[in-house]
Image (tube, rainbow, N blue to C red):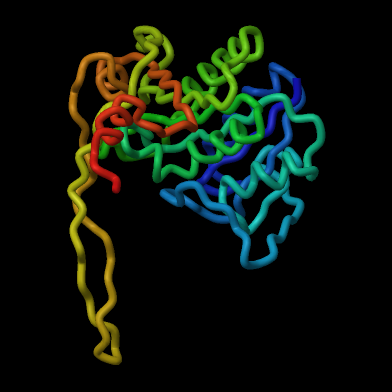
Amino acid sequence: MHILITNDDGVQAPGLLALAQEMRRLGKVSVLAPDKNWSASGHVKTMHRPLRVESTQLADGTPALMTDGAPSDCVALALLGLVKDVDLVVSGINPYANIGDDVTYSGTVTAAMEAAIANLPGIAVSLHTTTSFHGQRDYSTAARYAARIAEKVMQNGLPPRLTLSVNVPHLPEEEIKGVQVTRQGRRIYRDELVVRTDPKGKNYYWIGGEYPSATMDEHSDYHAIENGYVSITPIQLDLTDYKAIPALEKWDWK
C-alpha cells in the first residue's frame, strides 16, 4: 500500500511527523505538504500562478516534498503525477478538532476531499485539544488510531467520493473509550470584526473573537470527542439537500 501524507500546518509540523511514522507500519509513505501554515484555508485550487515544489526532510530524516500551494494543491500535484501509484491519502494530524461547519474551512479536511475527487479514499485526522491546554501535544494516540482506521479503509473500501473526518481526543490511549461513527454537529462561532489603523491612518481588519464551541447533540462529532470517543464522520462531496428539491420545485419559476 502506498500512502500519501499531507496537512495544512506545514511540512515540519509535529502532527505530520507522528502520522508519517505510524503510517509506515502499513506500507510505503510519501509526503507532499505545504511549506507554511495554511490553517482554515478551505478547498483551494491555485490557478493564477505557478506552484513550486522543493525537496526537504522531516525532523527524523524522512525525505519529503513541500510546495508553496495549499493543502488541496498538494494532493492534486501528487495525484496528477508527482507521486506515482497512490492508494490512500491521509491528511493531518491537525492540532485542533475539525467538527461541524469547520470542515468547510479546514485545509486538513479539504485535502482529504481532494483525494475523493480523484476517486481515492481520503482520511482527515485532527486532535481535540482544549483551549486550556498548554504545553507540547502528544500526537501518538491520534496517529495510532489513524493507522487503524486507514487499515480498515483499505480492507473494506469506501464508497466513491467519500471522505472520513476523524477527530481524536487528546488523551492517553488507555483513556479512549472507543470509536463512534458520528454526524457533523453544529459549530458556534463567536467571530468579531477587529478594526485597527495603520501608521498612514488607513483602517485594516482582523476577524477575531473567542474560540468557537459546539452544540452537544447526541451522535454528533463534538459529543463523541467530549465524552472520550474517537469520532469518525463520513463526509460526501455531494452537498445537495435532496429534501429541499420538492419544495423548491413548487415555487413559481415563470
The image quarter in which residue 138 lies: top left
Where residue 212 sits, quadrant-wise, is top left
Q: Residue at x 28, y 65 (%)?
A: 206
**72 left or right, relative to 225:** right
Q: Quadrant of the N terminus?
A: top right
Which residue is painted at 34% across and 20% down in the image? 183
Q: Nearer the viewer, residue 80 or 193?
A: 80
Q: Residue at x 46, y 51 (%)?
A: 41
Q: Is residue 100 above or below residue 180?
A: below
Residue situated in front as seen by the camera: 27 or 214:
214
Outermost residue to the front: 254
In this rendering, the count of numbered labels is 0
Q: Position of residue 110 (x, y in %)?
A: 50, 40
With 93 as the anchor, is 128 left or right in this view?
Answer: left
- Residue at 40% over, 41% down: 104
Q: Position of residue 82 (x, y in %)?
A: 79, 45
Relative depth, front residue between 79 and 161: 161
Rendered position, 47 above or below 247: below
Quadrant of residue 72 in the image? top right
Q: Is residue 180 left or right of residue 3?
A: left
Residue 198 in the figure: left or right of residue 91:
left
Q: Is residue 11 above or below residue 197?
A: above
